[in-house]
Amino acid sequence: MAVFVHPFRVVQNTTAGKFIRELAQCRDFPVAEAAYTRAVALYPGDVITLQNGGKLLKRSDAPQRGTNR
């Protein structure tokens, strides 16, 4: 099994915060963002995160900027 180490990761978690699986590793941010957007649509009941190393870039259950949520 090949192990890739790319800077951007898309991860699927339960709403309780339990890790389910890593959905994607990407070298480029636009590709990672597209994978994140698709994962959010495919798994609406789970929390999807887009990470750069240890830094959290996006989280599907976080309030969106510019909204009143």
Image: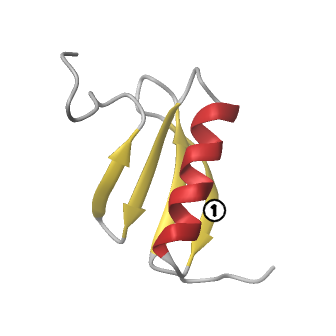
Q: Image quarter for residue 1? A: bottom right
Q: Residue at x 35, y 48 (%)?
A: 58
In the picture, the quarter occupied by the C terminus is: top left
Mark 1 lies on a secondary structure that is: strand
Q: Residue at x 55, y 50 (%)?
A: 36
Q: Residue furthest front?
A: 66
Q: Residue at x 42, y 23 (%)?
A: 16
Position in image of residue 13 (x %, y %):
51, 37
Left or right: 61, with 22 as reference point: left
How many numbered discs, if any?
A: 1
Colour scheme in the image? secondary structure
Q: Image quarter for residue 53? A: bottom left
Between residue 3 and residue 57, name the one nearer to us.
57
Q: Residue furthest top?
A: 69
Left or right: 43, with 14 as reference point: right
Q: Image quarter for residue 46? A: top right
Position in image of residue 15 (x %, y %):
45, 23
Q: Can you identify the residue that label 1 sits on? A: 24
Against 37, residue 25 (above or below) is below
Q: Residues within 10 Å of mark 1 (few under 14, many from 20)?
A: some
Q: Amino acid type of disc 1?
A: Ala
Position in image of residue 61 (x %, y %):
37, 28
Position in image of residue 57 (x %, y %):
31, 56
Left or right: 67, with 12 as reference point: left
